[in-house]
Image (cartoon, helix red, strand yellow):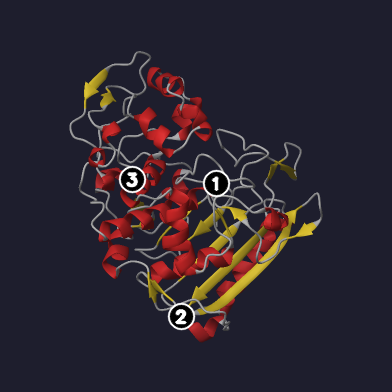
Amino acid sequence: MNKQPISESQICGCHNGKFHALTAAPHEVGLSDEWLGRLSSTTQGFIDNQQLAGAVTLVGRRGKVAHFEAYGMSDIEADKPMQKDTIFRIYSMTKPVAAVGVMILCEEGKLSLDAPASVYLPELSGLKVAQDPEADVFTPVKADREMTVQDLMQHTAGLPGAARYMGGNTAVDKLYRKAGLHRLHEGNLRELVERLGRIPLLYQPGTKWHYSIAADVLGRLIEVASGQSFDRFLAERIFQPLGMIDTGFYVPAKKIDRLAGMYGPKPSGGLQTIDAPEGGTGHISKTSFIEKPRFLSAGGGLVSTASDFARFCLMLSGKGSLFGKRLMKAESVELMTRNHLPENLIPLDKKPEDRYGGLGFGLGVSVRVQQTDWVPASQIGEYGWIGGTSTEFW
């Protein structure tokens, strides 16, 4: 569990099997009653210590729900308890959903992981690279090769992340702001790619793992390859087949009372309402997540519930199938969920270092390649990802 002091928390632990509206005692599906009991007490401890305002935890295995609990408050000011169907802003847990969309289109022959991204997005052809991304003077050099679709999937494309284009002070960071990357919400996915085509890469493609806006580029890639808007593609090809009825880019008015608030630590102790994830580089507006956005972020735009996202998890652990419906081939899931980074790019260059130690990266998900003291009970090959408001799945 991510221990950031943010209230909006959702954890999905999923193993092989299908999801049905059936419950089982943990030991009946090969899980430990004691350890799942610890999950409950540990989560409640975060709330009692005011590290979280509320949380929902769900664990499923062998087609049955072995654990599903809600804790604390979804809205402290309104004295509203957390419910099992509370809707969360899942932020970067959107990225694996976009990755599944790419894999579906690869199976249909509309995309290829090995192809340069510019085959589908010509705006990205011939990009220069910053010779030194930390320099006070920008010096462009020729790229050794073009970024591929797979580079975008595994964050080795050389693209910048939010910390650079929102708050960085180097010459190349200033170029990113001049191009308007810090105002992504004002545009759409097509306009994002057009802007990226006018600015340099931070790194040579394939040489560094750098958490970036690559997933948003994947959203545009999906639009071009499918001929559909990104939100319609996800709805028709992923959410509807899986029965993810509360997942989308905004919360409809009739469901707005189910949207969890966001809270961070007060300097004096306790929690206070915040307008961005902790460590975030931009605030959310009053209409964020309650009106359809112009910018359909494939990197962090979705809202969902624990039970909805459990369906997505169980589709992956079911090798692409759920409820007898096959969303993608087993081979695609296996390719997506194994590490693709060379040893020199492991562990992931992301903070806190302990949190990301022992992790490689697949196609849209992290993959554990080494055990560490941070999660001693973890297993090699586990995969998943996190969201900015303490949401997490594996």
- Tell me, for residue 62, which label it has, or none: 2
Whole-number angstrom distance, CA of label 3 to CA of label 2: 37 Å
Residue 71 image-quadrant placement:
bottom right
Identify the residue shown where x is 66% and y is 61%: 86
Residue 175 image-quadrant placement:
top left
User: Which residue is the extreme one toward the top?
Assistant: 137
Residue nearest the observer in this picture, 333 or 31? 333
User: Which residue is the extreme one toward the bottom?
Assistant: 28
First-in-chain label (3 vs 2) = 2
Whole-number angstrom distance, CA of label 1 to CA of label 3: 28 Å
Identify the residue shown where x is 56% and y is 78%: 66
Secondary structure under tag 1 reads loop
Q: Dot 2 surroundings within 10 Å: few (below 14), some, or many (20 or more)?
A: some
Identify the residue shown where x is 73% and y is 56%: 257
Residue nearest the observer in this picture, 365 or 228? 228
Counting from the top left corner in percent of width and height, residue 61 is at: 48, 77
Counting from the top left corner in percent of width and height, residue 343 is at: 25, 48
Look at label 1 and name its amino acid: Gly
Residue annotated with mark 1: 388
**In the shown orientation, is residue 83 left or right of residue 134?**
right
Q: For residue 188, say whether it is visible.
A: yes
**In the shown orientation, is residue 260 left or right of residue 345?**
right
Q: For residue 375, say whether it is visible.
A: no
- Tell me, for residue 224, which label it has, or none: 3
Look at label 3 and name its amino acid: Val
Secondary structure under tag 3 reads helix
